[in-house]
């Protein structure tokens, strides 16, 4: 998950980094980096993570004043003197500075160990989001941009020989064309402001509620039968001797996959999909109404139509066609898999002397899908877990990325970080030795921390007003099991896959070499942004990389070849059901954002039953904890499946054929795809790297569906 910071109208994008991912940059082209920061450093020129709540409030006020001055300068330019340099260039430089200062203020809400700091950061985020709306609706600035930018394109675009500059002007023009309807109508602009501010605050509240969620369930040891010894030993105990199980990923997913006690799984599933149910359901349904109103004010039939305007898919009709075609191909496979799960449940109930109710429930799915891997592929998950200690996985992952992309990573000692478990690394080009970026690893859960896995861009790589390059910085935030005095942090294989995915986003952030913050790193079309990260997931399903990232936690021995073969073969396990679930989420998202209002729980339940064949648990509402819907993927969740089609084409067509660890292909990938950031359209990058138009064949081959598809097409 690449965390997008929400921006609320296309005009706002002109003043805030496109599809912005919580990022921070340094002012005045400073070469200051995270390494040089300390508690005594200048507060406005460093990546500081020790700001007090009062300092956050003070710096928020200062940032607003500074940015207002920048836009005042654009708004005061004489109309006849408007040109690229005194309008769009000024705005571009302001974006970089704004991102620089903003995210030292709004990122702590996701990671700070201090609740007071998280609250102050959240409030700063709200104030700055309100400012985004205000500045985006300034008629004086808008007038100077829109009245002259067309003439810039007509008379000067050919002189702007840099392709990134051309794209910057063209993208700005598209934004203007979207929002200029009725701009100078005062009542219109006031309504836009009001709606946008409400969307901003509600989105922040939605995510804050999830971050602060701290439900704990209590179970006796007999309720946890089937779970690994390392799992149970890692749980805290209540005074009465029961075990405390939270809804954090390292607790929830292993329990749902391994616990033999159906009632325990039911309670966990019920609690997990009831997180923040009442408050966030109300927020989400209000967001849906507000987004629909805003889209119609801007001349679009729905919010989905609005947000898809600048994606590869372009409109909801193309998204629906893509999802429907995928569903048609996956449905027969999903039905077969569902029937097989039901047979496993019947046999399991008979073996344990339990009543068989003839149904698959939501709390049955992870458990019996895990059994498929054991029964059909003989994957011993307990044994496999022992070969993935976090430190070994991290070392292997970093080495693989270094060798593949021509980089060198160095851990920075005594780094300024927000928690003592966080590590900071410097990234250097392996040939020139030049430092190209830095990244943080924050890998363990703690109270109040962001609860999923995500890459946060903290500083966009771009040129400052003085022509000096600003170094990109990113953070990989995850929630892998903490080590204890008796057990190391051991990763499930799917967590290793998540680690590789998110680090793919980190590399996208750090390897880009663009002029504008607008195009830095992952600032690409939303339905292309997952391509680089999904492509790199493939390395955790290949023998050589797996050997490099694994060793037994006790004696350092390698994974036996037999276990590796079984793991790799299991990649196609449950592929129909897992991809159908992604279609459920994508369809639910599209449905919610093509309507004026919706019953979110009912919509999700309908799609789950119709597409997946599994009813939602009564009384739950999965969408109340569906953070993507308040994190920049609203109307665009289909992007995960859409991107996977392209990512598989890249892997199978180039890396699988020419060598999965071939540094020549890796460096070409870095140059063509990663370095370009968003300065080149995603489809153009694909064509350049593949040497042809992309196709879907590799996607179905990877899912183990190629034979099924061929049989269907021949009928």
Image (spheres, rainbow, N blue to C red):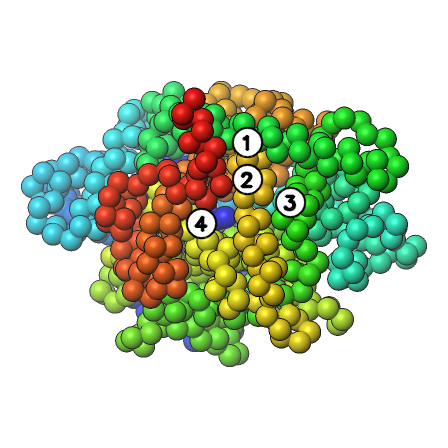
Label 2 and label 1: CA atoms lie apart by: 8 Å
Q: Quadrant of the C terminus?
A: top left
Relative image position of residue 435 (x, y in whole percent): 34, 72
- In the picture of the structure, the residue carrying the numbered disc 4 is 534
Residue placed at 62% from the left, 39% from the top?
625
Relative image position of residue 396 (x, y in whole percent): 51, 68
- Tag 3, which secondary structure? helix
Label disc, if present, on residue 376 of the rendered structure? 3
**Residue 589 in sight:** no
Other-residue count near label 1 (Cα within 10 Å), few / some / many at <14 / 14–19 / ≥20: some
- In the picture of the structure, the residue carrying the numbered disc 2 is 575
- In the picture of the structure, the residue carrying the numbered disc 1 is 333
Q: Earlier in the sequence, mark 3 or mark 1?
A: 1
Q: Earlier in the sequence, mark 2 or mark 1?
A: 1
Residue placed at 50% from the left, 55% from the top?
541
Q: Are marks 2 and 1 in contact (CB under 8 Å)?
A: yes
Camera-side mark, 3 or 1: 3
Q: 279 above or below 72?
A: above
Other-residue count near label 3 (Cα within 10 Å), few / some / many at <14 / 14–19 / ≥20: few
Camera-side mark, 4 or 2: 2
Q: Earlier in the sequence, mark 4 or mark 3?
A: 3
**Residue 173 in sight:** yes
Label 4 and label 2: CA atoms lie apart by: 16 Å
- Tag 2, which secondary structure? helix
Q: Earlier in the sequence, mark 1 or mark 4?
A: 1
């Amino acid at each position: 998950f690449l965390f997008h910071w929400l921006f609320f109208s296309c005009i706002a994008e002109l003043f805030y980094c496109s599809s912005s991912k919580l990022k921070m940059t340094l002012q005045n082209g400073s070469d200051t980096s995270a390494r040089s920061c300390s508690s005594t450093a200048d507060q406005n020129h460093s990546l500081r993570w020790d700001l007090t709540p009062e300092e956050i409030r003070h710096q928020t006020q200062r940032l607003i004043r500074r940015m207002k001055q920048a836009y005042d300068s654009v708004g005061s330019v004489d109309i006849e003197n408007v040109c690229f340099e005194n309008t769009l260039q000024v705005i571009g430089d302001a974006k970089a500075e704004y991102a620089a200062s903003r995210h030292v203020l709004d990122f702590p809400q996701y990671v700070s160990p201090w609740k007071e700091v998280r609250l102050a950061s959240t409030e700063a985020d709200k104030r700055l989001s309100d400012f985004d709306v205000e500045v985006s609706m300034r008629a004086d600035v808008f007038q100077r941009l829109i009245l002259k930018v067309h003439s810039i394109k007509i008379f000067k675009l050919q002189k702007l020989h840099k392709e990134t500059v051309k794209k910057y002007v063209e993208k700005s023009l598209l934004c203007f064309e979207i929002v200029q309807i009725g701009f100078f109508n005062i009542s219109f602009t006031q309504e836009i402001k009001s709606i946008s501010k409400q969307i901003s605050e509600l989105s922040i509240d939605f995510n804050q509620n999830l971050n602060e969620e701290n439900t704990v369930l209590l179970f006796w040891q007999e309720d946890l039968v089937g779970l690994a010894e390392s799992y149970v030993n890692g749980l805290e105990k209540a005074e009465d001797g029961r075990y405390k199980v939270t809804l954090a990923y390292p607790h929830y997913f292993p329990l749902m996959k391994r616990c033999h006690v159906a009632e325990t799984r039911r309670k966990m599933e019920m609690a997990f999909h009831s997180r923040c149910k009442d408050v966030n359901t109300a927020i989400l349904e209000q967001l849906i109404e507000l987004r629909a109103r805003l889209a119609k004010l801007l001349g679009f039939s729905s919010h989905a139509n609005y947000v898809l305007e600048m994606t590869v898919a372009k409109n909801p009709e193309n998204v629906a066609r893509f999802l429907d075609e995928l569903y048609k191909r996956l449905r027969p496979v999903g039905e077969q898999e569902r029937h097989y799960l039901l047979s496993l449940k019947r046999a399991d109930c008979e073996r344990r002397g339990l009543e068989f109710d003839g149904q698959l429930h939501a709390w049955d799915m992870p458990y019996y899908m895990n059994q498929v891997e054991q029964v059909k592929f003989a994957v011993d998950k307990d044994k496999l877990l022992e070969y993935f200690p976090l430190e070994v996985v991290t070392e292997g992952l970093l080495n693989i990325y270094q060798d593949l992309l021509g980089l060198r990573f160095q851990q920075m000692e005594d780094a300024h970080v927000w928690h003592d478990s966080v590590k900071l690394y410097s990234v250097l080009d392996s040939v020139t030795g030049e430092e190209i970026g830095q990244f943080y690893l924050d890998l363990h859960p703690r109270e109040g921390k962001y609860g999923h896995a995500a890459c946060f861009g903290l500083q966009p790589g771009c040129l400052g007003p003085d022509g000096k390059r600003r170094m990109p910085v990113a953070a990989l935030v995850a929630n892998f099991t903490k080590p204890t005095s008796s057990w190391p942090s051991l990763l499930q294989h799917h967590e290793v896959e998540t680690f590789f995915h998110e680090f793919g986003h980190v590399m996208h952030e750090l390897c880009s070499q663009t002029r504008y913050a607008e195009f830095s790193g992952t600032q690409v079309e939303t339905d292309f942004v997952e391509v680089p990260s999904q492509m790199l997931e493939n390395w955790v399903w290949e023998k050589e990389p797996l050997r490099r990232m694994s060793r037994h936690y006790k004696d350092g021995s390698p994974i036996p070849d037999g276990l590796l073969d079984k793991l790799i073969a299991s990649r196609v396990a449950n592929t129909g059901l897992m991809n159908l679930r992604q279609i459920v989420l994508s369809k639910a998202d599209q449905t919610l954002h093509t309507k004026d209002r919706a019953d979110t729980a009912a919509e999700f339940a309908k799609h789950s039953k119709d597409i997946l064949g599994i009813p939602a648990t009564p009384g739950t509402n999965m969408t109340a904890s569906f953070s993507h819907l308040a994190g920049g993927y609203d109307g665009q969740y289909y992007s995960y499946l859409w991107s996977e089609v392209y990512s598989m084409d890249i892997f199978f067509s180039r890396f699988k054929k020419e060598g999965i660890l071939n540094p020549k292909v890796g460096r070409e990938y870095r140059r063509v795809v990663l370095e370009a950031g968003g300065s080149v359209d995603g489809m153009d990058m694909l064509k350049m790297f593949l040497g042809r138009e992309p196709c879907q064949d590799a996607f179905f081959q990877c899912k183990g569906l190629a034979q099924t598809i061929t049989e269907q097409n021949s009928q």
